[in-house]
Image (tube, rainbow, N blue to C red):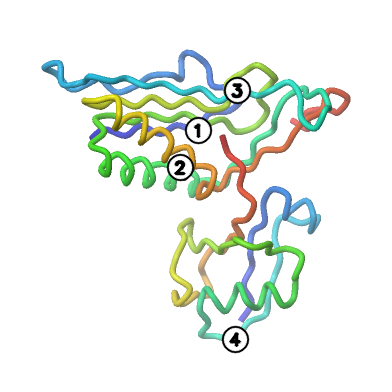
Amino acid sequence: MEVRVKLFGPVAAHANANEITLDVDHPITCGSVLTSLRRTHPDLAPAGARLAINHAFVADTHEVQPSDELALIALVSGG
Amino acid sequence: MIVRVSIVEGAVQKSHQTAPQRPAGGATGASLTFSGIAREMEDDRRLKGLSYEVYQPMAQQQLERIARDIGAKHAIQTLSVVHSQGFVGVGEPSLWIQINSAHRAEALLAMGEFIDALKRDVPIWKSPVFADEPTGD
């Protein structure tokens, strides 16, 4: 299945995009999506990067659904 | 415990800095306020300000969750936080936090932990806007 992952901050600037699309197996876990992203876009997921699913951090074993909203959360710098 | 979270456009104004009413009966012994302010210089370059990108509604939900977790851990009475999105000029506040508790130790601990968690777990990104650049807004 195809999943779209939102990008923000310096990662979005580096990718020159606010979103990327990944072609992944279904079913797939959150951890496997992140692994796939690291494989296809190794420069977009620095150490500590996490995926949020539907606006929340979830366990790596959480199963991703086609309708889910995925976001790559990396290098946050609020405050 | 009462938690109040706001994300506002631009700098945090005085009118945004409203905290829930303290518990009645004089139970509050410490009221601690923190403001984060945009600095003038970064890496020896003069700034016009900071631009904040916020992933909503996750940022709001994360701030509320962190506030409740840390508030419960330290027996906090009220925790209010206001964070900016968009452009904040040098010298203006981008973050305002007020914590009320029975004793100062809990408020001080909670404040440090809350700010650490904000900087680690809340999807907000700031980027410098240098004095010789447009704000982008």
User: Are marks 2 and 1 in one subunit?
Assistant: yes
Location of the C terminus of chain B by quadrant is top right
For residue B63, side relative to residue B48 (left or right): left
Residue B106, percent from left and from top: 29, 32
Residue at 32 percent of width and 19 percent of height: B31
- The answer for which chain carries disc 2 is B
Residue at 58 percent of width and 39 percent of height: A78
- Give the crowd class for mark 2: few <14, some 14-19, many >=20 residues within 10 Å: some
- Disc number lying in front (4 or 3): 3
Residue at 53 percent of width and 48 percent of height: B120
For residue B107, side relative to residue B129 (left or right): left
Which residue type does callout 1 highlight? Answer: Ile
Residue B8, percent from left and from top: 53, 29
Instruction: Identify the residue position indicated by label 4 in the image.
Output: A25
Instruction: Identify the residue position indicated by label 3 in the image.
Output: B37
User: Are marks 4 and 3 in one subunit?
Assistant: no
Which residue type does callout 3 highlight? Answer: Ile
**Is there CB contact under 8 Å for labels 2 and 1?**
yes
Residue at 59 percent of width and 60 percent of height: A71
For residue B81, side relative to residue B28 (left or right): right
Between the residue at mark 4 and the residue at mark 3, the CA separation in whole angstroms equals: 46 Å
Task: Return the mark for residue B7.
Answer: 1
User: Are marks 3 and 1 in one subunit?
Assistant: yes
- Disc number lying in front (3 or 1): 3
Task: Return the mark for residue B60.
Answer: 2
Say whether disc 3 or disc 1 marks the residue closer to the N-terminus: 1
